[in-house]
Amino acid sequence: MFKAFLQLLYPKLCFACQEPLFPSEEFICTTCRIVLPRVELAENTPNWVRAKFDGLIEFDEAHAFFHFMPGSRVQQMMHQIKYKGAAELGVFLGTWAGDALKKSHYCSEVNAIVAIPLHPKRLKERGYNQAAVIARGLAQSLDIPLHEDVLARTMQSHSLIGLNRAARYEELENVFEVIDPVKLQGLHVLIVDDTLTTGATFLAAAQKIRAAGATKVSFFALAALK
Ligand SMILES: [Zn+2]
């Protein structure tokens, strides 16, 4: 009763379109759930997601859930997860994505999930790692263990804005470190990040994870820029 009253005074808003939610809705309104631009999870991985990694590293699968477009509702959601403390939204979207992957029979051979880590200083500022909350939802839905303390970001990178993939990769090549290689031996690791742009971050992390003994790597981003 009190909650309903509060909801009247301070309606919860959809994280994507900012319109008030109905009491039966959570995080994202029904309209947005239908219209948010999703990456097709049909028979084959969309070529444009795979193309970001083809020829650069040996990998198994590469998926993204939403199309990232500047100024879009997807960007609005990602901004909330990254900068506005909406950690629970990240878990919710990770779970939704996991359900979709499961239905499409993707990631069935993955046996470990690793999120792209933040530098400890950034983690302290933000209070949580946005990639890790998405990975948590994904791991719950797919019922695959999430390894939260295997990969670390040991260096802060400079701004990557304006750099091409090769320059980004060079900047990121040594920012990640596997701190517990034993936990990755012989596993197929799904590496998870919030956003996929050039793929340089994924590549840098994947090189380290493979070098540490994982037999296969796959990639998942909640949103990808075409
Ligand atoms: Zn909405």
Image: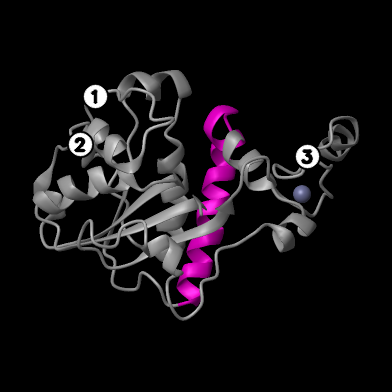
Give, as a three-letter code, the residue at label 3: Gln
Give, as a three-letter code, the residue at label 1: Met
Of 2 and 153, which appears nearest the observer?
A: 153
Give the colour scheme shown.
one colour
Q: Which mark is residue 173?
A: 2
Rendering coords of residue 176 (x, y %): 21, 35
Please identify the dominant SS of the magenta region: helix
Residue shown at 37% from the left, 50% from the top: 192
Q: Which residue is mark 3?
A: 18
In the image, the segment drawn in magenta is 80-104
Under circle 1, the secondary element is loop
Q: Which residue is mark 1?
A: 155
Rendering coords of residue 83 (x, y %): 55, 28
Labels 3, 1: front one:
1
Labels 2, 1: front one:
2
Give, as a three-letter code, the residue at label 2: Glu
**Cα distance between the residues tagged 2 and 1:** 10 Å
On screen, residue 142 above or below 207: below
Residue shown at 16% from the left, 45% from the top: 208
Q: Earlier in the sequence, mark 3 or mark 1?
A: 3
Under circle 2, the secondary element is loop
Neighbours of disc 1 within 10 Å: few (<14), some (14-19), many (20+): some
Q: Quarter of the image containing the N terminus?
A: top right
Locate residue 126 relative to residue 33 in the image: left or right. left
Neighbours of disc 3 within 10 Å: few (<14), some (14-19), many (20+): some
Of 113 and 198, which appears nearest the observer?
A: 198
Rendering coords of residue 65 (x, y %): 52, 59
Within the magenta stretch, is there residue 38?
Answer: no
Of 110 and 78, which appears nearest the observer?
A: 78
Label 3 beta carbon less than 8 Å to ligand 1: yes
Q: Earlier in the sequence, mark 2 or mark 1?
A: 1
Rendering coords of residue 195 (x, y %): 47, 45
